[in-house]
Image: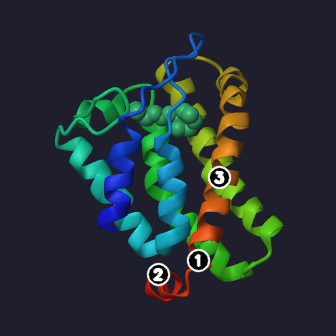
Amino acid sequence: MALMLALLIVLGLFPGIPLGFIPVPIVLQNLGVILAGLLLGPKKGTLTVGTFLLLVACGLPFLTGGSGGIAHFLSPTGGYLFAWLLTPWLMGSCEKIFNPKHQVVKEFIFIWLFGVLFIDGCGALWLSVYEHMSLIKALAANIAFIPGDSLKAVLALLLVQGLLKNKQLASQLQ
Ligand code: BTN
């Protein structure tokens, strides 16, 4: 959990890429959120992402671009941050129900649904309220994130599959 927290913080050191047409940059930290869900499961993953968000809320500059503070949760990116908290829980809980163990395609669908579509959907919903734009427009703008976020989901899956080949690590994580 401590390592994952550190990874989330380190991913925030990579500068965000502004898109111009919405006040939300392309970032790497959502890759850390997906990895937290995959490697730590629903409880520990949520606790880790929750701790990260709590530190941000306390003012620590851990978000991309060195920002932090409680006000950030009410900024245009507030919806994504809220979704980050729920993502490990949703990913882990649904996996338990459907148990797609070791089936790469199913596993990827779960990661994509909750680590990509859910986060971008919540972000769009909040953005439409915050920026007084129609939900359709906000959702359409968020389509720009889908290719990059899908790549992050593939990367997360490959990383986790590689890591879990190490039997000692796999048993420690279970
Ligand atoms: C923040 O630093 O305030 C949060 C930024 C959230 C950016 C979101 S996460 C999902 C989507 N994919 C990206 O690369 N950027 C947005």
| Disc 3: which residue | 155
> Identity of the amino acid at label 1?
Leu
Return the disc, 3 or 1, that comes first in the chain's sequence: 3
Going by the image, does 120 lie left or right of 55?
right
- Viewer-nearest of discs 1 and 2: 1
Residue located beneath label 1 in the image:
164
Question: For the residue labelled by badge 2, is the local secondary structure a helix, a strand or a loop?
Answer: helix
Going from N to C along the chain, the mark reached first, 3 or 2, is: 3
SS for callout 3 = helix
Q: Residue furthest top?
A: 20
The three-letter code of the residue at mark 2 reads Leu
Q: CA distance from mark 3 to mark 2?
A: 19 Å
> Is residue 123 at all visible to an observer of this figure?
no
Mark-to-mark CA distance, 1 and 2: 9 Å
Question: Would you name the residue on which mark 2 appears?
Answer: 173
- Is label 3 in contact with label 1 (beta carbons under 8 Å)? no
Observer able to see residue 146? yes
Height in image: 41 above or below 9? below
Locate residue 83, reporting x and y percent.
Answer: 50, 48
Q: Is residue 17 above or below residue 86?
A: above
Q: Residue at x 26, y 30 (%)?
A: 71
